[in-house]
Amino acid sequence: MPERKERLTPDRLNAFSDGVIAVIITIMVLELHVPSLADHPGNFEALRDELPLVLVYLLSFIQTGIYWVNHHYLVDDLDQVTHGILWANLALLFSLSLIPAATNWVAVRHISSFSMALYGAACAVPGIPWMILSTLIQCRTQTPPASGIVKQFASVCLYIGSIPMAFVSPYIAIGMIVLVAILWLLPPRKIVELTRTPAKP
């Protein structure tokens, strides 16, 4: 009787990725602390002083969430994983785990040229393994990614550009990263068309 060959389905890759991304988001929210009464006796003053950190946390949450959503779109076309896809996915998860560290740096050191340059670098690093993973999956499925190559390349350029821009204006650097988030919050045309198509009974 011939030996049965098991296919390397993407189910475990999806489950592991979901778990790691969930931990990354949880770590970020744990870095939000209530200001002490000694430093900020007034509640509204404390909220005003902590607002930049809350906004950076929100931006980090959105950035991580964008990767999770588009990871779902990307892997959805995949019916079998390869050794290269597994390692590219691990590299993506590792680079995403740097975002909480950069977010915490901003929390401790506040918004400055260096802190925003570091934050921009942390946002830029995941773009490289993402493009590798996207290319490997495209080669495997012969299906172009839903997001498109142009959007990926433009996002990496904006992220990298925010690093030197942070030394000109930290707030312009934040604006560049926000622009990337806006680009990715818009659903890909392929996904819009699929969701408009009624499911077959």
Image: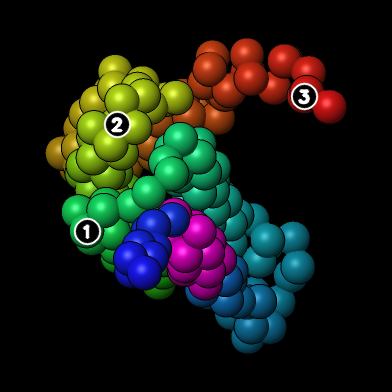
Q: Amino acid at mark 2?
A: Gln
What residue sits right under mark 2 in the picture?
138
For image coordinates 29% across by 31% down, the residue present is 138
Circle 1: element type: helix
Circle 3: element type: loop
User: Between disc 2 and disc 1, whose residue precedes?
Assistant: 1
Tally of marks: 3
Is 187 or 169 nearer to us in this picture?
187
What residue sits right under mark 1 in the picture?
83
Q: Position of residue 16 (x, y in %)?
A: 47, 67
Majority secondary structure of the magenta segment?
Answer: helix
Q: Amino acid at mark 3?
A: Ala
Q: Amino acid at mark 1?
A: His
181 w.r.t. 63: above or below: above
- Residue furthest to the front in view is 1
User: Between disc 2 and disc 3, whose residue precedes?
Assistant: 2
201 w.r.t. 127: above or below: above
Is 133 or 126 nearer to us in this picture?
133
Is 196 or 128 nearer to us in this picture?
196
For image coordinates 57% across by 71% down, the residue present is 26
Which quadrant does the N terminus fall into? bottom left
For image coordinates 31% across by 25% down, the residue present is 142
Image-quadrant location for residue 189:
top right
- Residues at marks 2 and 3, CA–CA distance in whole angstroms: 25 Å
Q: Which residues are magenta?
A: 10-23
Q: Is residue 151 left or right of residue 91?
A: right
- Residues at marks 2 and 1, CA–CA distance in whole angstroms: 15 Å
Q: Is residue 36 left or right of residue 177?
A: right
Crowd tier of the residue under label 3, counting other residues whose Cα lies within 10 Å: few below 14, some 14–19, many 20 or above: few
